[in-house]
Image: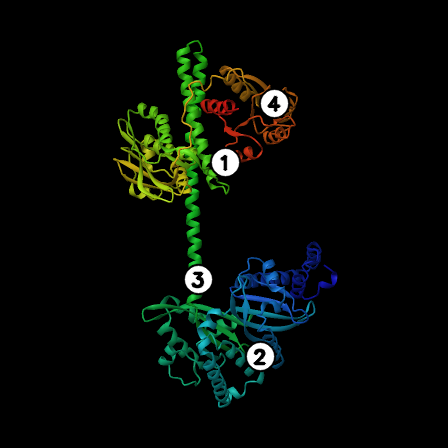
Amino acid sequence: MNQQHIGDNLFEDILSLLDHPEDNELDIVSQIAQKQQNQAYSVKMETAMKMISFMDEMPGGFLIYHAEHDEKIIYANKALLRIFQCSSIQEFQKLTGNSFRGIVHPEDLDRVETSIWEQIAASKYDFDYVEYRIIRKDGTIGWIEDYGHFVKTDAVGGIFYVFIGDATQKHHRQQMERNALIDAQKQESERLKDIIKNYDKEKKLIHQENLRRLEVIEGLGVNYDTILYTNLDTEKVLPYRLSDRIAQQFDYENKPCEFLQFVHGYVNTWVHPDDRGRVLDAVSPDYIREKLADKKTYYVNYRISVENTVQFLQLRIIEVGDGDHISQVVMGCRRIDEEILREMEQKQLLEDALNRANAAIVAKNTFLSNMSHDMRTPLNAIFGFASIAKANIDDQQLTRSYLDRIEESGHQLLELIEKVLEIAWMESEDVHFAETKCNIVDIIKEVYDSLRPATIDKNISFSLECTELKHPYVYSDPDKLRQLIRYLTNNAIRYNKNDGKISLTIKESDEISEDFSIYQIVIQDSGIGISQDFLEHIFDPFERENNTTQSQVFGVGLGLTIAKNIANRMGGDIEVSSTLGKGSTFTVTLRLRIQTDSGIDEKQSDNLYANLPGKRILLVEDNEINLEIEKEILQGIGFVLETAINGSIAVDKLKHAKPGYFSLVLMDIQMPVMNGYEASKAIRKLEDPAMSKIPIIALSANAFESDKQMSLESGMNEHLTKPIDVPLLLNTISQFLTSA
């Protein structure tokens, strides 16, 4: 910023800053800081900056713009941006061309500018009032009121300060009355002039005071149904306009009356008891003089009681005198019910959001506590049984039992981690459900068989009923469908009683529409049940009912949340009914596209793995522990293994290998030098067709759906996650090797 921009008047310095945003802010701060060495200047600057901050937070619109040339906008507050539906000053500048001319509707522009300058020329105090149309960001038309004041400054030249109010609703409401109102205002104005001339004290008012008063009165005339002129020295009030209810109470016929008598009569009759003291204080002569010492106007909001209903009103007090002594004010009263209701609604929205945020914090704190407990429990078992197994290494039977317990605890820990990852995946934007051919009955039977051992441990009667389905073959995501049924069934087992009962049933509706059929999967148990109050929150994440901990049943409260999300994303839903102490019933309803032809080869080969031994696999893994485990598993089956500790070495081995030397690649993802994605892309670009088309299976700890998608996009054929599911790994390898 050039030194010339800094003047002796601090507020003009601020105006210059607003008008020159391209200047270096550090230069500006430096120049202001130099002036702040003067204590008096520092106080002035603090006051000016508070003024700027106040303008930005005003409830109504406020605008400063150049009066000449292109009428460039210097400043616009937040309320004005909201009127134009703009979220930032940049949007507002783009919408308006950063000019006052861009604010006014093109059809109103000539009228508005002509009116402004005519009013400025006629007004000693350079005030203007105009009403015109605007075009909001969404293209809709609105109306605004423009209260302007022309000022000449040394810093930026001639400028307009403008107070702007949204007059759209008022305009629409009063449009039909406008012509009649204009005629009435003209008649009233002439009558008021005659009244003023008939009173000696009014004749003593200087012309400037009359003009100022009339300007204020005419400016208030549209919105304010009660207008009073008050002389604080004589404590007399002259009603210019009275609302119907006040006119019925007081019969003043536009004659001066005692101010305090009038105010007390109004307040005691209409104002809400809780607001009376505050209103009386706000209109006392001493308080008025104190408030108007620093500004030309102030207001007070209050309530009145009308026919057993509460209305919100605003009393605005404006100084109209000319001089240091404050003696003449105009008071205007208008209804503000809509504004107050908007404020109350906004406040309620904020309170609701705060309550939801607090509830989420409590839920997540509970989750962290439960998660800590449920992770430490299997970890304690793993470390404990590992220590005991070491001490009894010579007892093979005992050691084997401890290893079984370690494996069981590992599965529990893995289940917790998978649930947390599943929730994170559900909340992401790239959620994708596959749609492949599958047998829904087979999926349910798989879940039943996998969970049956857990029911035997608790002596639970576990029944499976698959009625004769007309269409067992459907298009769906088999993994997610399996996961959905597993979470609900596992929940029934976990919260059931010893010697309890569980039934798993699937039914198909008789109605078929557009190759879609309705399937119902019902899981019914005789467990501890769910209270009616908690049923509303049962699918919320991290939520657990108190009776679960009292029953020594622990969990992080994510399984049902995941199941609900899966069902919803499949276009279905889950309903639950329960009786505390007697059990619960979960009903999953899914609308799935059916297959008229299964399209699935159900031939099972008895020699699925017969041809696998002797096949050479390239195992790409940089972690020594993982490498050791995977070698033991694969070599134990009979595979011939070669290893590479990064993607670069793997690509090099395939490039120089003889045709048919390697049958398959198991690829880790996160590796030094070259990761799995990069290595797979390089392999697919090899000149040797046999090597470039070799099956590549990702074997990674990256378990998100986005990770799987990235593997496929890089050229891999399949993505399997760690810890290794040995049967799944062998089945996947056999599919690619037997089909080759």
The residue at which mark 4 appears reads as: 645
Dot 1 or dot 4: first in sequence order is 4
The furthest residue to the top = 394
The residue at which mark 3 appears reads as: 342
Instruction: Look at the image and tell me whether residue 236 can be seen.
Output: no
The residue at which mark 1 appears reads as: 705
Tag 4: Cα neighbours inside 10 Å, few (<14), some, or many (≥20)? some
Tag 3: Cα neighbours inside 10 Å, few (<14), some, or many (≥20)? few
Tag 1: Cα neighbours inside 10 Å, few (<14), some, or many (≥20)? some
Q: Quadrant of the N terminus?
A: bottom right
- Residue type, label 2: Asp
Q: CA distance from mark 1 to mark 2?
A: 75 Å
Dot 3 or dot 4: first in sequence order is 3
- Residue type, label 1: Glu
Secondary element at image label 3: helix
Q: CA distance from mark 1 to mark 3?
A: 44 Å
Q: CA distance from mark 2 to mark 4?
A: 90 Å
Report the number of discs: 4
Residue 148 location, quadrant: bottom right
Q: Please tell me whether mark 2 or mark 3 is closer to you in this view.
A: 3
Q: Is residue 606 left or right of residue 529?
A: right
- Residue type, label 4: Ile
Mark 2 and mark 4 in contact? Answer it, CB < 8 Å: no
Residue in view at x 63 percent, y 68 percent = 65
Q: Please tell me whether mark 3 or mark 4 is closer to you in this view.
A: 4
